[in-house]
Structures are given as C-alpha cells and as structure tokens.
Amino acid sequence: MPDQLGITVLGSGYWGINYVRLFTELPTARVVSVCDLREERLQEVKRRFPDITVTTDLDEALHCPGVEAAVVCTNAAAHYDVAQRSLRAGKHVLIEKPMATTTARAQKLLALAQSKGLVLMVGHIFLYNAGIQTVKAYIERGDVGQVYYVYARRTNLGPIRSDVNAVWDLAPHDVSIIDHLLGQPPRWISAVGTKVLRNCREDVGFIILGYPNGVLGHIHVSWAEPNKVREVVVVGSDRRIVFNDLDPVEQVRIFEKGIAPPASEPEPSSYGEYQFSIRDGAIISPKIEVSEPLKNQCNHFLDCVTKGCTPLSGGQNGVDVVRIMEAINRSMLGRGRPVELNWDKTRQVEKSYEYQTGIAGTFH
C-alpha cells in the first residue's frame, strides 16, 4: 500500500469539489482524477487543481494509474450505476447519501463490495459531526435519563433538485442521526408529503418514526420555508439537548430540566392525583472542538481502507437508511398509512420496488 491512497472523484458539483479540496489537503491521500459530464465543472477543477486529470469518461477516470478508491457524488439517481462500476473495477468506494434509490440496489452494492473485499462507506456526514458526537455521548452516559422522543427540522428555500424529492434529498441525514443517537432503527413509520410549489415531486414532508419502548422520532423537511433550520432535539426525563448546526458558538445546548412520573407509586385514580417529579436546573453549552465533519469523514474513509477500521457509516448502515426511506415513500403514497419494518438478525431485505424519481438515472 503506497503512502498516499490514489482517489478519483466522480461528480464535481458542490460536494465533489469539496471532496477534491479535502483529499488534496490530507497527507495520506492523492486525488488522481475527476470525472464529470459538464465541461465547465471540469474546467473549474483544472483551474484550482492543475495536476489532477479531468475527464468526461467514467472508465478513464477509474482506470487512471494509481487510482485505488472512488468517491461517488453524482446525483442520487446515478449512485447505483456509478458505484457498482467502481466496485467492479476493484475500487474502494465512498458514496454520498442516499446510497441508492431502492433497497434492492443498495443491497446489491453491499454484496458486491463484500464479495470483492472492498470498503464501502456511505456519506452520512452528521455522524462525523462533533456536535452530534457530543449529544450521543450524553445519551450513552445516561445523562439524558429515559429518552422520550427526538425531533429534527431541516428546512430552507430550496435548492430544488431534479432527481429526487425533498424527503429523499434531506431526510436521510436525520434518519441516520436519529438511528445513531438511539442505537437502533425504527420499527414502524408514518409519513405525509405535499407539493406546495406545484412541482412534480414532494417539496415538504412530515415523518414519524416509531422506536422500541415507545420512543418516537419526528422529522420535518422542506424546500419551501423561508427560515433555514438545521436542528435536532432530544427530550428525556432528566435533560433536553438541542443540536443547532447553524450556531457556530453554541452548537449544542443542554437544558438540565426534565419531568418524570414517580416509579414506585401506584397508578393514580384521577389526573389530579398524578404526581410528577420535576427537575429544574441550568442551561449549559459544552465546549466542542472545532472540526470539519467532511474532513473527519474523509480521514475515517482513509483509515478504513489503509488500516482496516470498521466504517461508522458502512454499507449495511447505508442499506438500512435506504430501506427506511422506501418505507417513508410507501407511507406517503398511502397518505400516512403506517408501514411496519421487520428487522431480523441478518438484515434480510424485503422485496423492494423501484422508487419512481420521474427522471432517468443518468450520470451528471
């Protein structure tokens, strides 16, 4: 294994150019090639990184001398095709979320990577965010007490995508976050969406996720809201924790307040007799070391390839999130009809259906 891992970046839009920048800065990586169908994007890459080979041909990018790993950051509809071609070429793969637009395709990518002994990692970037890691640590230590529910909001005015709806564009972030914080996937899902912008796909969505022990998750996503919000809130019996990705000063706030029924008293005969144990304390903002989540993710991918580390957001994690997204879509089609998710020990995938994006999965 050379001192620097040779990488090709497939897709050079907003995320692609950031991957090029970061892998170029990291001492254990070297960006060999970049592929995109848009000549203007390749010209921008060449202007900023003149030593990198640029091409519109996927096979040429994959087979440039020295390429050992591929970063797939095309549009979501093209993820499966580009990732499977990369894996068949013998390259380790880091793929942007969602891993694919159907569970069946995501499962095929996982099986292909396993059969070839290659690393397959999904870009669930918030798992590498120091603020989310802080929230996770509070929950694992038991400082939150009994978790009652978790809710997330991810809203803004656009950008309107042409390959997937707002739910598939935004909700995978929060699905991966809530599953990570609670340490398990949901058992059932109910979701509704609407097309307030009279677009051909949903631009607003409301999702409820049912977890064991009565814990609920709620996700609100929107392309149509003037107020940009990136927030995750955990409410427990002892504390309420707020993660605000847009607050550079107090990214995490801990409210040392909570309420819980007494565990030892018998069931009350009326509401008036019910006694609650109320905990009231300070509001604190823990110190969080400044780090770039995408850089953390890139470093982790390099460690997984060169040192054999287990990916935090590996292929199975990507399959699980896609499966949840498909269940969300089925519930939306049924106007909120609950959809059960029967997870077993081997994560066997239920028969999937093709998710209809309305646009062919071309590489661009």
Image: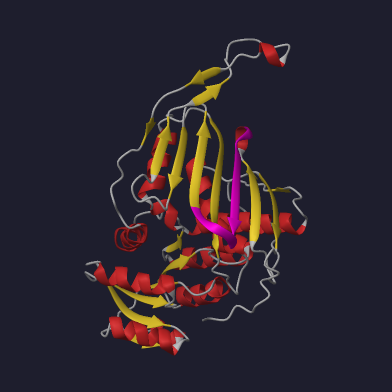
- Can residue 217 be found in the magenta stretch? yes
- Can residue 123 be found in the magenta stretch? no
- On screen, 184 above or below 176? above
Q: Nearer the viewer, residue 314 or 159?
A: 159
Q: Which residues are magenta?
A: 214-229
Give me the residue at 43% from left, 89% from top.
39
**Extreme residue toward the front, this view:** 226
Position of residue 275 measured from the top left corner of the image (x, y, whole percent): 61, 14
Position of residue 245 measured from the top left corner of the image (x, y, whole percent): 42, 51
Question: Which quadrant would residue 64 be assigned to in this image?
Answer: bottom left
Would you say the magenta stretch is mainly helix, strand or loop? Answer: strand
Position of residue 4 measured from the top left corner of the image (x, y, whole percent): 24, 71
Give me the residue at 30% from left, 41% from top.
287
Is residue 257 rendered to the left or right of residue 302? Answer: right
Q: What colour scheme has been applied to the protein in the rendered image? A: secondary structure
Q: Nearer the viewer, residue 342 or 191?
A: 191
Question: Which quadrant would residue 305 be assigned to in this image?
Answer: bottom left
